[in-house]
Image (cartoon, helix red, strand yellow):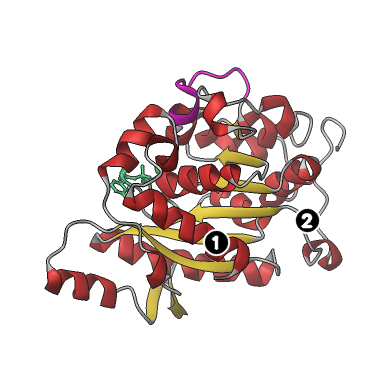
């Protein structure tokens, strides 16, 4: 762990291409309300059910995931302090168990507080040299404690938090609902993530786009909304327009299911509320795909 005041060393190519033991999966989309937190919570629940040690890192200043899991947004120390202290405060110092600990098993959460919105200002004031690597450094110290780290992000890909998430990750998933704006966020996210893969994290893998909520369409709109998610698309962000493959995981669509929202509100995963619900079954299949490639 770096000493107080020490800046994060620039990662060498060797460090950047190092294989990570723990899978670190960011859930992202350049759009809020696109099912990112639901996907994160339900993947966490399903990984935990299989006996894996899971850490959820909340990087959204709205603290939704933190609130669902713990029942509060008030923390003296949060992921902000880990990142803004440049390694003085470790991830393990801030991790807390969920309020329904008996259901979540060994799952822990690194909570987020609203002061994360000051992250870039804070790291600038501290003259931290490579602010994109802060989360990666923090995770390096905790790798041995977790099999899977899931990072829940805000609906804005052009932030220091989002960059930190993708730099620290082995994989990322784009979560979407069927709304036009969420779908537009997919190629925007891909364009930025591609840049990060090229420049900062050669090991970053795109697992695919998950339709986390497939809501009540008629037959025509079902075909239209699924077709719109298929094949290459154009992403335009920050002045760049690029053709990207959004890798739609069409075999892993999560149906619209009231149990998802009910579970989220109760601070549990959908399977913990109702293991036979359609959404719980879809998440089970998605985790098979992530872990086994099926
Ligand atoms: N499969 C689903 N069925 C029904 N509601 C869902 C489903 N997935 C997500 N939701 C609901 O959609 C809303 C937005 O999802 P959320 O995960 O909070 O989005 P984000 O994290 O991207 O802002 C929440 O109220 C959530 O409970
Ligand atoms: Mg969210």
26 versus 224 height, above or below: above
For marks 2 and 1, give the one nearer the viewer. 1
The reply to whether dot 2 and dot 1 touch (C-beta < 8 Å) is no
The dot on residue 288 is 1
Magenta residues, start to end:
68-77
Residue 231 placement, left or right of 172: left
Q: Nearest the camera: 72 or 44?
A: 44
60 versus 251 height, above or below: above
Which tag, 2 or 1, sits closer to the chain's start? Answer: 2
Q: Quadrant of the C terminus?
A: bottom right
Residue 288 within the magenta-colored segment of the rendering: no
Residue 76 within the magenta-colored segment of the rendering: yes
Q: Nearest the camera: 62 or 265?
A: 265
Q: Give the quarter of the image for residue 134.
A: top right
Residue that appears at 37% across and 62% down: 185
Q: Pointer 2: what residue? A: 21
Q: Is mark 1 within 8 Å of ligand 1?
A: no
Q: Position of residue 101 (x, y in %)?
A: 56, 25
Residue that appears at 60% across and 17% down: 76
**Residue at the front extreme, as displayed:** 276
Q: Position of residue 77 (x, y in %)?
A: 63, 22
- Category of crowding for the residue at label 2, using alpha-carbon neighbours closer than 10 angstroms: few (below 14), some (14–19), many (at least 20): few
Q: Position of residue 21 (x, y in %)?
A: 78, 56
Residue 155 placement, left or right of 125: left
Q: Give the quarter of the image for residue 89.
A: top right
Q: Quadrant of the N terminus?
A: top right
Q: Is residue 157 visible?
A: no
36 versus 99 height, above or below: below
Residue 244 placement, left or right of 148: left
């Amino acid at each position: 762990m770096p000493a107080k005041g020490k800046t994060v060393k620039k990662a060498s190519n060797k460090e950047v291409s190092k294989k990570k033991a723990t899978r670190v999966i960011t859930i992202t989309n350049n759009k809020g309300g696109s099912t990112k937190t639901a996907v994160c919570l339900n993947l966490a629940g399903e990984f935990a059910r299989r006996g894996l040690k899971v850490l959820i890192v909340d990087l959204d200043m709205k603290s939704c995931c933190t609130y669902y899991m713990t029942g509060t947004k008030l923390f003296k120390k949060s992921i902000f302090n880990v990142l803004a202290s440049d390694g003085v405060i470790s991830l393990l110092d801030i991790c807390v168990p969920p309020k329904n600990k008996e259901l979540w098993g060994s799952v822990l959460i690194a909570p987020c507080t609203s002061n994360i919105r000051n992250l870039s200002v804070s790291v600038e004031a501290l003259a931290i040299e490579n602010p994109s690597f802060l989360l990666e450094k923090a995770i390096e110290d905790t790798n041995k404690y977790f099999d899977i780290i899931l990072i829940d992000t805000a609906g804005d890909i052009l932030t220091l938090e989002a960059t930190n998430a993708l730099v620290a990750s082995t994989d990322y998933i784009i979560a979407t609902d069927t709304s036009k704006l969420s779908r537009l966020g997919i190629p925007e996210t891909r364009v930025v993530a591609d840049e990060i893969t090229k420049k900062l994290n050669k090991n970053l893998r795109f697992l695919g786009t998950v339709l986390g909520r497939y809501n009540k369409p008629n037959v025509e709109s079902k075909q239209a909304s699924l077709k719109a998610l298929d094949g290459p698309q154009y992403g335009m962000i920050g002045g760049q327009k690029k053709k990207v493959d959004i890798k739609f995981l069409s075999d892993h669509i999560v149906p619209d299911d009231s149990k998802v929202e009910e579970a989220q509100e109760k601070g549990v995963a959908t399977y913990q509320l109702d293991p036979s619900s359609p959404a719980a079954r879809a998440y089970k299949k998605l985790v098979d795909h992530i872990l086994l490639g099926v």
